[in-house]
Image (cartoon, grey):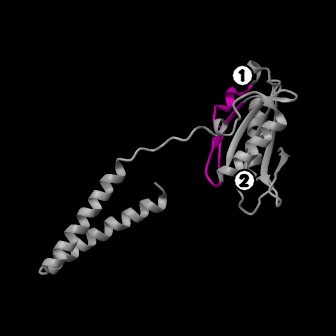
Amino acid sequence: MSLLERRARRSQGAGLVWLLLAAVAVGAREPVLILALGAALLAWVLLRSRRSGRKKVRRTPFKSRHGLTQRQPLEEFEARMAAGMFQEGREVFVTAWCTDTEVVRCTASVGGLTSCRPADDVRRWAHHAHRVGADRIRQYHNHPDVLLRSFPSRQDRRSHAHLTELLDGTGVALESWLVWRSWLGHARFKRFGP
């Protein structure tokens, strides 16, 4: 349920309570007012109970929806990943463990409109790299199509510096990439650092 729906429900409930208090204050001399208020209160209770019983449907993970789970060439991976990022409409954080030409493992998480974070424990990134035979880690994230922002934020640079510190001395290189949609609609990639 969205924030707007919750606020609307709260305001509806508060409105009904105020109506009830007004009816009591007036002395409830009007039977039509009492019936209308009772019907409105009953409708509100039934609506609330019906909505609370709904189950949320869990979406499949980002990397499964966009074909990023198997080992694949880097160019193919980036094309699929960028297309998926544009479809989400939210910030997406993707971590890819790479060899010279292939992506051998990846994780992804979908965040909000203005922020996102890694899907897994960043302290284990070097361990995963050694386990799968990757010599570098590429972390990608996008800025949704708000003002076509094609530059990394201050937080992006801080995050890169922190991740570089964690991987220092492990023999695994880190590359940070920003992904955005160009004016012509295709994906653009910009590497950034501290």
Evaluate whether residue 184 shows in this view.
yes
Q: Amino acid at mark 2?
A: His
Residue 22 painted magenta? no
Q: Is residue 79 placed above or below 41 in the rendered structure? A: above
> Label 2: few (<14), some or many (≥20) within 10 Å?
many
Nearest the eye: 175 or 16: 16
Pair 1/2: label in front? 2
Q: Amino acid at mark 1?
A: His
Query: What percent of the width, then of the height, locates residue 105?
Result: 73, 28
- Please report the bounds of the magenta region as a residue range: 106-127
| 1 horizontally vs 78: left or right | left
Residue 117 higher or lower than 180, as above or below: above
Q: Foreground residue, 94 or 154?
A: 94
Q: Which residue lies under the disc numbered 2?
A: 143
Q: Secondary structure at mark 1?
A: helix
Q: Position of residue 91 (x, y in %)?
A: 67, 49
Q: Tell me if residue 158 can be seen.
A: no
In the rendered image, which quarter contains the C terminus? Answer: top right
Which residue is disc 1 drawn over?
Answer: 127
Find numbered disc 2 in the image and state the secondary structure of the residue it sits on.
loop
In percent of the image, x 28 and y 69: which residue is there?
16
Upstream in sequence: badge 1 or badge 2: 1
Residue at position x 75%, y 52% in the image: 154
